[in-house]
Amino acid sequence: MSQETASLEGYDGDLLRELYRKMYLVRTFENTVQELVESGDVFTDAHLMQGQEATAIGATQALREGDYMTTTHRPHGHILGMGVEPRRVMAEIGGRETGISGGRGGEMHMFDPSQGIIGSNGIVGASLPHAAGAALASQLDGDDAVAIAFFGDGASNQGVVHETMNLAAVWELPVLFLVENNGYAVTFPVEESSGPDHLADRAAGYGMPGKTIDGQDVVTVYDEVSDAVDSIRSGGGPQFIEAETYRYLDHTVSLTGMFDYRSEEEEEQWHERDPIPNFRTRLIEADAVDEDEIESIEKTETERVEAAVEFMEESEFPPAEDAAAHFYQNEDYDGVYQPRYR
Amino acid sequence: MMSTKSYMEAVNESHYQTLEEIEDAFVMGEDVESGLTGTTGGLVQEFGPDRVRNTPISEPGFTGLGIGAAMVGKRPIVEYQINTATYVSMDQVVNQAAKLSHMSDGQIKAPVTITVPMAGAPGSLAGQHSDNPYPAFMNYGVKTVVPTTPYDAKGLFRSAVEEDDPVMVFFPTVLQANEGEVPDESYTVPLGEADVRREGGDVTVVAVGETVEMALEVADDLADEIDVEVVDPRTLVPLDEATILESVEKTGRVVVADNANRLCGAAAEIASRVANVGFWSLEAPVKRVTRLHTVPPSFAPPQEERVLADADTIETAVRDLV
C-alpha cells in the first residue's frame, strides 16, 4: 500500500511520534552536516542520506535491544536510528575525541557495540558478513538476537555480498539483508549494473524470501521489517528486503552538481514523495499527532542538532601521541608498535 | 605427561583441547568436518557440526562471518585449505579484522584465528598453491605466527586463539611429519618470544618457518668449523627483536633465512632491524636467504628447487660471513 492511502488506524501514537521524530532528526542532522561541509567548518566531505530517512528509521525502529546492525558509508541515519546521541555522531564527523569512534573513523566509520552497532564500513559490501557472523554467534548461543545488514544497490554486486547471502541461507542465520536501492552507485544507474528487474528477485537464488517495498513510507518499512524480523527471530531463517528509495544529494557533498546522470523530472518525482512532509501531513490528517506536538518535536530535535554542533566544536581532537593506541587489543609486547623513525 | 607426537598430531590435539576448554571457540573452513588438512580430524564427531563447520568455497564470506562472530564475543578459528586462498579475502583480513579495533577506538575486538595448514611449497604444486603468504599480512600489522616444532605448534596455536586480536597461524607443510615431545595437556607458548634453537658464537642464523630445520642441519654440518647459533622468531608480528639482537651482539654476523618471497619479506624486516639497531655489533653485512625474487615455484622440480630457499644456500651465506 502506498503512503497516500495507507491508514494509520490502529498504530500506537508513541510509535508514530517516534518514527516522525527520528526522521526529522536525521533530516535536520544531515542538512546541518551539509552546511558544515559547504562552509568548510568541518574538514571532511560527507555521504548524506536526505531522502532515505524512512528506510533507515522504519527499519531500525523494528529492532530491539540486543540486536545487531551493520551499515554502509552512508550511515548517519542508521546510527541515529539505533539511538546514538546526535552529539557523538556530530563529534565524529568533526574528528573529535568525543566522537562515536573517538575521532578515528570520521563520517563513514562509526561503531558502538554497546548499542549493537558493529560497524558502518568504508568498503562497499564488506560489512555484510559481519552482520551474518553476529547472527551466527546468536544462533550458536541459542539466543534470539537478530542482525540487520544495510547495504546499497552498489554493494549488491560485490562478491562477498553473494557469498554472505549464500552462507546465511544454508545456515539459516537470523539476519535480515536490507538493500537501500537508491537507484545509483555514485552515478551508475542500477538498471545498468544489475540484471533483475528488482534486486529482491535475487533472494530466490540464495534460497530465502525476498520482497521489494516502498522505502519512502516509514510505516510500510516499519511493518515489513517488523514482520521479517519476527519471522527471523523465531527461527525462520534469513530474509531479503529491497527498499526503493532515493538520495536527494549527489554521492557526496563535494560532488554536488558535478555530473549529469539523472533528470530533473526524476528528482522532482521523488521529492514529491518526500517521506518527512508527507508523513507529517498524514499524522495530522489522521489525528494521530497534533500539529502543536509535531512542532514541539521539531523544535526539540533542531535544538539537539544545534547542541551537537556546539559539542563538536568545543571538543578536542584526539591527542597525536595516541595515534597507534588500540591497533591491538593486546598491546603488551616490547616494541609492539614500531616507530616512524629509528 | 609428555609423549612423542608429530607436528600435525600436536596441532590436531590443540584444536581438540581448544574446543573442549574454550566454549566460544569453533572451527570453520572448507572440509574441516572431514579433517582434510589434518588439523580437525575427529573433531566433528566430538563437538558436532555447529562447532566444526564446513563452509562453501567462499573465503571472503566465511572469513567475514568469522570476524563478525568474533566482534560479538566468539573465538572463531577460520581455516584456509590452500595457502594462497588468503589473497582472495585480503579485504576482510587486512582492511576489516586488522583495522577494526583501531578504527573503533578500541571498542571492537575481533579475536579471530586464521590458520593456514598448508603453508609453503609442499612440492610440485606449482605457482598458485606454493606460497608462504605471511609477509603480505605482516605488512598490515596482522599478528603472525609460524611454529616450527610440534611443541610450539600446539602451544602457539592455543595462544593465538586466546589472543584478543586477529592472529594468523601458518603451519609449514614440510614440517608436519616431524616428531617431538609434546605435553598431553593443553598449554600456551606466548606470542612475541623467539627461541634460540641452537647456541653458537660465530654466526647467527635467524631462521623462519621451514628454514629452521635447514639452518640446524647446516649448523650440524659445520660444527667443526663454524659455531652457528640458530634463532627461531616463532612469531613475526610481534617480533622478539631483543633475543635476535642479543645473538647479534654475541656473533656480529647474521644470516636471515626465510622460505618466502624476498621483496618486502619477513627476512627484509628482520635484516633491516638488525642493520639499524644492531649495526655497531656487526662485523659483516647482513645476508638474506629467501626465495628467488618473488618468482613462483615451477611444477618441474629443477625449477622449483632453484626458486626455494635451501640448506646449501644457507651454508653458502654462513661461509661468506666468516
Image (cartoon, grey):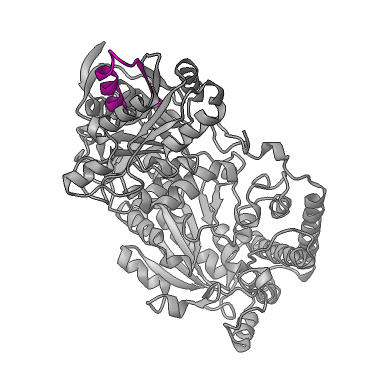
Q: In which quarter of the image is residue B263?
A: top left
Above or below — where is A294 with respect to B158? below
Magenta stretch encompasses residue A337? no
Closest to the observer: B219 or B321? B321
Q: Position of residue B65 (x, y in %)?
A: 40, 48
Q: In which quarter of the image is residue A318?
A: top right
Which residue is pictured at 64% across the width and 83% down the height? A272
Residue B14 visible? The answer is no
- A139 left or right of A300? left
Above or below — where is B194 with respect to A172? above
Q: Position of residue B305 (x, y in %)?
A: 22, 41
- B107 left or right of B12? right
Closest to the observer: A96 or B280? B280
Which residue is pictured at 44% across the width and 26% down the height? B191
Residue extent of the magenta highlight: B212-233
Q: In which quarter of the image is the C terminus of chain A?
A: top right
- Number of marks present in the image shown: 0
- B238 left or right of A141? right
Which residue is pictured at 53% across the width and 45% down the height? B99
Q: Where is residue B173 in the image (x, y as percent from the top left)?
A: 24, 35
Residue A73 visible? The answer is yes
Q: Identify the residue at the far bottom of this view.
A: A265
Q: Where is residue B84 in the image (x, y as percent from the top left)?
A: 32, 48
Closest to the observer: B219 or B191? B219
Magenta stretch encompasses residue B230? yes
- A77 left or right of B51? right
